[in-house]
Image (spheres, coloured by chain):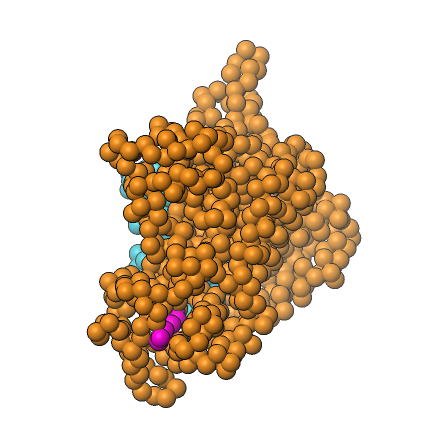
Amino acid sequence: MSAITVPELRIVGFLCNWCSYGGADTAGVGRFQQPTDLRIIRVPCSGRIDPLFVLKSLVNGADGVLVSGCHPRDCHYSEGNFYARRRLEVLKRFLPILGIDERRFEYTWVSASEGQKWKNVVQTFTEHIHELGPAPRLDASLVKTAEALLTDAA
Amino acid sequence: MRIGVFVCHCGSNIAGTVDVERVALEARAFPDVAFASDTMYACSEPGQAAIIEAIREHRLDGVVVASCTPRMHEPTFRKTVERAGLNRYMFEMANIREHVSWIGKDTEANTRKAADLVRMAVAKLANDRTLTPKKFSINKRVLVIGGGVAGIQAALDCADGGLEVVLVEKTATIGGKMAKLDKTFPTVDCSSCILGPKMVDVAQHPNITLYASSEVADIGGYVGNFNVSVRKKATYVDWDACTGCGQCTEKCPSKKATDRFNEEIGTTTAINIPFPQAIPKKASIDPEFCIKLTKGKCGVCEKVCPTRAIRYDQQDEVVEEAVGAIIVATGYDLFDWTRYGEYGGGRYPDVITSLQYERLLSASGPTGGHVKRPSDGKEPETVVFVQCVGSRDKSVGRPYCSGFCCMYTAKQAILTKDHMPESQSYVFYMDIRAPGKMYDEFTRRAMEEYGTRYIRGRVAMIYPKGDKYVVRGADTLMGGQVEIEADLVVLAVGAEASEGAARLAEKLRISYDSYGFYMESHIKLRPVETNTAGVYLAGSCQGPKDIPASVAQGGAAASKVQNLFSKDQLESDPQISNVAIKRCIGCGKCIQTCPFGAIETVDFRGMTKASVIETVCQGCGICTSTCPQGAIQLQHFTDNQILAEVNALCQQSPFRNYE
């Protein structure tokens, strides 16, 4: 087993089935080597992505979230990515209000033929998240205190 | 729930960089997993049999296969679990090949990632519900877009099979690029002799409705029930009345109109029939050059027309057609060679494209088949062909090989010698690519029997010298520079995606590659299907193709349509939205956002509620992320299922100890 020099971070990817998931497949078929931090969740359309999914991921401890869909005007469901674009843009501005670094969330458009582009997107975003480092977590002692207080209250 | 996990080696494709046994071992510890094993080829016959056996033996309720992309084998494994008596939607796939083993070399990291993907699939499957498809009836008519040889073949094959066909062609005649060719390789058949009868068949076939000078304006609906609006462009001639007698074209005083059929070699009249064998053989007016339409004077054609077919005030007309399947055969465009400044960039009259040369060679062309230089009408003695103009050239954004240019250049070299026995042809080539049946023999004939001199190397520049042109290039076999004084230079231009291909793709909801060619569903196994059900591809719109390949693909697309229409009813995908009626507040936001109009309001005990029209819903889930109540849920991709995946991924310790 080779030792991992840089510890992996947790990056969640939400990809539409028709373009970006296909693009990630194309990158695989092309054997374009990529960092392993990203795990992909397949959804039918970027318009299916509820901003809640991104928030839940970040709140649950993901260090980064990447959303990718079909290029605008090239959606398999004709306009799903337009809805996605609006929702995700609003979300991006909303994240700092929740105390989440908005740089941990990115959305992009990659078509099924753009294997090379997908590789670059993954590479850049992963490097970017590594620069930011692991998402801040609650201090373990604080959690313990809180738990103790809750038990006392109960 | 009892879930079975099968981790595929895919030979060494996955097992090479993922410790599959360990992934299976890990999977046994995941919640709900009752069985986990690894398997050499899960998709093979013994692999599938093992899955079925495990389902029976371990009384499994659902199956996760960790192997390749679900875009490849999800249908395969769904059938497998169905054969074992499970509902086909109680199945999930983890993509550990394209997304893991093929993109990372680190076995430790890959194994961990693969285990994570399996964990996510298991978590999703634990929330899966059985789904049952609904049936809906289909309209057995087919739309063919594009009347080139691929579209003609597709239309005829469908029509001969008893289907009603609507053929839409944007120019005034069908025939496409093939109709412009003089001869075809490698048989040196006369092009119009083999295409002409097919064009006539289209015109006479009772099952084919032909709309020439028309474009697809809009497409709605879904497989089995598409609604298409076709815009018939104004031709300023009533085609029902026009008999194609040609009296108008004889008398038309405006003779400077662009002759598009002859590739702008020479001019034509403002009212014209593209060529004598045109189908439909109807006249149309070029409004740019018509004196009546531009200046309000003239009106000669109206006076001479024996059937009174001229309509100067004609407008575009939109007709609606309902079809069940669509074959796209929109073909290609030739590369615009004027982008090559070193070849004159369109400034030299005697540096022409291969298709222009084809018109010069053609007996029905503007010169009656006599090769004449466009500048002075003289017969050329030395003809130089330059290959790969707009092919295999990254600098102009066309790094791909157009495939047919080597062959048509060899054909044109042979025809040049046939037309002018005293002439000498030279071909500058990069490589000869002649892989088709009888192709290599054909190019050799051009060299050996017809004495065409092939020079391996790229042309650096072309410049005029007196009334000749100097073609200067490298001869990489001899290792030196060559200069040839040519009377005529023919550029073997490559193919590119046709103009407007992207706009049509958006209407059809199909994808296209970075060059604009339409993408097939699977490059090897589904070459004429697209990812949109009921939309098929034929000919060069998918990538440059020669005539045999286009005809073969046209026929293949037609047979796919016949296959689709062999049933009277289709099964709809049950992965569609569903409204929880108690949670629905009837706000109507889902109705506003649905791109397919698949949601309607219903009255439920005096309250307004949303309801999904099951056969119309395409399963995108835009409504689900719109609904403020979470009342409308896309089945198989519900909020709970996706969040289960998120939880499975985020809530586990990122560094598990495998020992």
The picture places residue B181, in percent across and down from the top left corner, at 47, 59
Q: Nearer the viewer, residue B628 or B199?
A: B199
Position of residue B536 relative to residue B189, above or below, is: above
Q: Is residue B15 magenta?
A: no
Q: Which chain is orange?
A: B
The picture places residue B651, in percent across and down from the top left corner, at 48, 49
- Most prominent secondary structure in the magenta stretch? strand
Q: Nearer the viewer, residue B161 or B569?
A: B161
Q: Nearer the viewer, residue B605 or B383?
A: B383
Position of residue B19 relative to residue B457, above or below, is: above
Q: Along the horizontal axis of the image, is A70 left or right of B443?
A: left
Q: Which chain is cyan?
A: A
Residue B625 visible here: no
Looking at the rendered image, the quarter that the C terminus of chain B falls into is bottom right
Residue at position x 67%, y 64% in the image: B41
Numbered disc total: 0
Residue at position x 56%, y 27% in the image: B612
Q: Nearer the viewer, residue B382 or A89?
A: B382
Residue B608 visible here: yes
Q: Is residue B385 magenta?
A: yes
Q: Residue furthest top?
A: B606
- Magenta range is B381-390
Q: Along the horizontal axis of the image, is B503 left or right of B632?
A: left
Quadrant of residue B46 within the rendered picture: bottom right
The picture places residue B591, in percent across and down from the top left corner, at 47, 26
Q: Residue furthest left?
A: B466
The picture places residue B18, in percent across and down from the top left corner, at 56, 67
Residue at position x 35%, y 48% in the image: B268
Looking at the rendered image, the quarter that the N terminus of chain B falls into is top right
Position of residue B658 relative to residue B507, above or below, is: below
Residue at position x 55%, y 52% in the image: B196
